[in-house]
Image (tube, coloured by chain):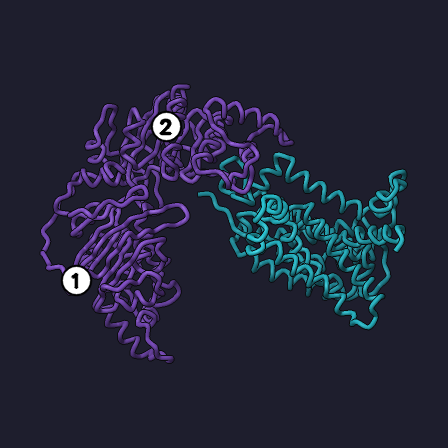
Amino acid sequence: MDTHLLLITLASILADSAPLVFAVIGETIGEKAGVTNLSLDGSILLSAMVGFAVAYTTNNLYLAFLAAMLVGALVAALIAFSSIVLRLDQIAVGFVLTLLCTDLSTFFGNPFVRQPGPSVPHLAIPILENIPIIGALFFDHNVVVYLSFVAILAAWWWIYKTQPGLKLQGIGERPAAAFARGTNVNLQRFLYTIVGGSLVGMAGASYSLFVKLGWSYHATSGLGWIALSIVIFGGWNPIRGAIGAYIFGGLQSFGDFAQSIFPSVPTQVFQTAPFAFMIIALLLVSNDAIDRFFSGSPVSRKIWQSLRGTPPGALSTTFEQE
Amino acid sequence: MRLELKNIHKYFGSLHANDDISLTVESGTIYGLLGENGAGKSTLMKVLSGFIHREGGEILLDGKSVEFKSPAEAIRAGVGMLHQDPLDLPPLRVLDNFLLGREDGFLQDRSKALADLKKYSAQFGFDIAPDALVSALTVGERQQLEIMRLLSLGAKILIFDEPTTGISLPQKIKLFETLRLLAKQGMTVIFVTHKLEDAQDLCGKVTVLRLGKVTGEVTRPFTTDQLVKLMFGQSLAASQRETIALGEPVLELRDLCVADFRLRVPNINLQVRAAEVIGLAGIEGSGQRLFLRACAGLDRPAGGELWINGAKINRQAYHRFLDSGIVYLPAGRLEEGLVPGLNLTEHLILAKRSKEFFVNWNLAQTQAQERIKEYSIRGAPESRVEALSGGNQQRALLALLQPNLKLILLEHPTRGLDIESTMWVWRQLLERRRRGTAIVFASADLDEIFEYSDRILVFSGGRVAKALNAKETSVTQLGELIGGKGL
């Protein structure tokens, strides 16, 4: 493979992973605040459908993305409300919403199945696109892909570099301590869950308006579950989460590539292989035995610890002031 | 800053946790707040620092009445509290902990925070690496970090809730040094403790709480005897008790060590004979629960040997202990002792440990009815256990016990019960004792310990005193041991 082809492949991996990146960043933000939005697989599907439907009927892409984000935010708000106000179990509510959103997408999406519709136009960034290698990799895409890059960096910057971000970590790790330091825990959790949810909506729309144009039943199925596991793989860190998303995207495109080389192997093998790899990767980063194995020398321990992440201490719990 | 609390009231349901408490603390002093568990100390301090809201009374800072809706407001007014388990964020780094809650702008000003942290560290001689994870620090170091954080937020009144519980001796010496320095700088230090020795070492003035009320206030110089009397009351008189000949040893502990992640109690040696009653005294959480659970076979001891009926039984499954006639009634009656959601009949069936596959419901129903009558439980065979009152839950637990037991282990057997139920529970226990069952119970109520025990085992600060003969022990002696003196 020559360099040019390699660059094109890598650039397309970066671009095609945009929905996964949005979903991973959105979920990471919500979980950092202590709220698990398990509805991802359903809400991505529903927002993909709504995004496409709005684009199809109005021919306005801004409106389409806005509507999709609204859907994602609404589902997230339901989870936040049922957890914070009604004190229901986040996992149970999230699971029910997954099923509900999936069915709603099938029901309302019926008129739009396999219709041709608008898509996000390509927009290379002048000057920057001419930088060797980097230009081709990062600056020869469309606005949605650029936004996915921005989302990664912005989330990282917000969480680790700002004062509100520190509070965000606090409410997810130990809400009582964050409360003692003057944070309105439940309000903040509400807001971050909704912000995370709108990014999840973004994921849906970017899928149906760019990665795989149009709408069909269960179009994005599986994307949400993989995003949830990549959040764990990424140790609740936006940058590591994004790397996980790109690795997954890379595995998928490698699968397509391998299939053309080994035509005799059933296609399902290459389609499911990335999921199997993810399971193995998850096992690796959350396994005590491997922990002990790597803790032999200080150097390997240090490298290993940077790969491992612990979930926010108060994940999926509710907070009540005494 | 001068602090006045006037007629503070706080209820938790029907429990009057703070009953008309008034006190005054002058700035530049170390003020002690002494009392047993459940005396209302922590509640009072949480009211003062904005964590919970009072139901009556007034808080005055330098003569001005204040009202705190949250701990953050209290801090802004100058009142900071250091919790027994420091309320920090262990997964984050020291500097992040120090930064979180500071109101300086949108971006994290790490260099300014670092300079602040260094300034305070130098002032008190603390040595904590700013980029260390808080989870890697000792409790003593976490306290130091909290002290610096509260000071940097402008705290003038610092409340320390049982600060010496989880720290080592050198750290305690360092802490006391720091508290004295704080007082010298004009801070108001409130030191909440149940340890007589600490109060005596440190405090210029001590207020003693008991059952939610102020029982007295003493100013230096004061004696331990004074404090003990205020803390435990004086109404402790041993009552008449029938003497029963003790039988064979049922339980023998040789250098037993019990431990969990935060507490380790080594070198427990004890022989319990049939029909003997042993009371476990001490501040709650000093290892009594670990001890009882180890004897019941629920937790493996961390070391030593456990002999039952003359056989070593250390590493045996829990059901072996049950088979040997040992039962444990925990303090959490509903949480650990019973199964919420199941009714009395179902409990009875479970407790029988029958090997039959099918349940004879009619028989079980009749038996449940009989037990309910026999143990005067206010309830029906189909009453779910969570619907019963605390006293009836305890009756139900006793009703579930098999007839011929060797040893009953109880944790706070009468906590939360009214007088009638309390008497009834003890009548039942003493009746079993007459038939040769040994009883080991933990209680926070010294009256109860004195009234029923043959011997008393005192737990304090990770140590156990040699079992005392109840008849030859005075209240003062026991109080001092519980407070960690002379152990």
Of A162 and B315, the residue lying toward us: B315
**Of the residues tagged 1 and 2, which is closer to the observer?**
1
Q: CA distance from mark 1 to mark 2?
A: 49 Å
Say left or right for A301 vs B411: right
Q: Quadrant of the N terminus of chain A?
A: bottom right
Q: Which residue is mark 1?
A: B248
Residues behind callouts 1 and 2 on a single chain: yes
The chain coloured cyan in the image: A
The single residue placed furthest to the top in the displayed view is: B185
Residue B218 x/y as whole percent: 24, 27
What residue type is disc 2 on?
Phe
Residue A150 x/y as whole percent: 75, 42
Q: Quadrant of the C terminus of chain A?
A: top left
Residue B479 x/y as whole percent: 22, 39
Q: Residue at x 13, y 59 (%)?
A: B246
Q: Is residue B128 above or below residue A114?
A: above
Say which label, 1 or 2, has the lower sequence index: 2
Q: Which residue is mark 2?
A: B176
Which picture quadrant has residue A264? Answer: bottom right
The kind of secondary structure element at disc 1 is loop
**Which subunit holds the residue at mark 1?**
B
Q: Residue at x 62, y 44 (%)?
A: A299
Tell me the number on the disc at residue B104: none
Which picture quadrant has residue A91? Answer: bottom right
Residue A107 x/y as whole percent: 72, 66
Q: Residue at x 89, y 38 (%)?
A: A127
Of B197 and A289, the residue lying toward us: A289
Q: Is residue B102 above or below residue A198?
A: above
**Which subunit holds the residue at mark 2?**
B
Of A44 and B138, the residue lying toward us: B138
In the rendered image of the structure, the colour used to display chain B is purple
What residue type is disc 1 on?
Glu
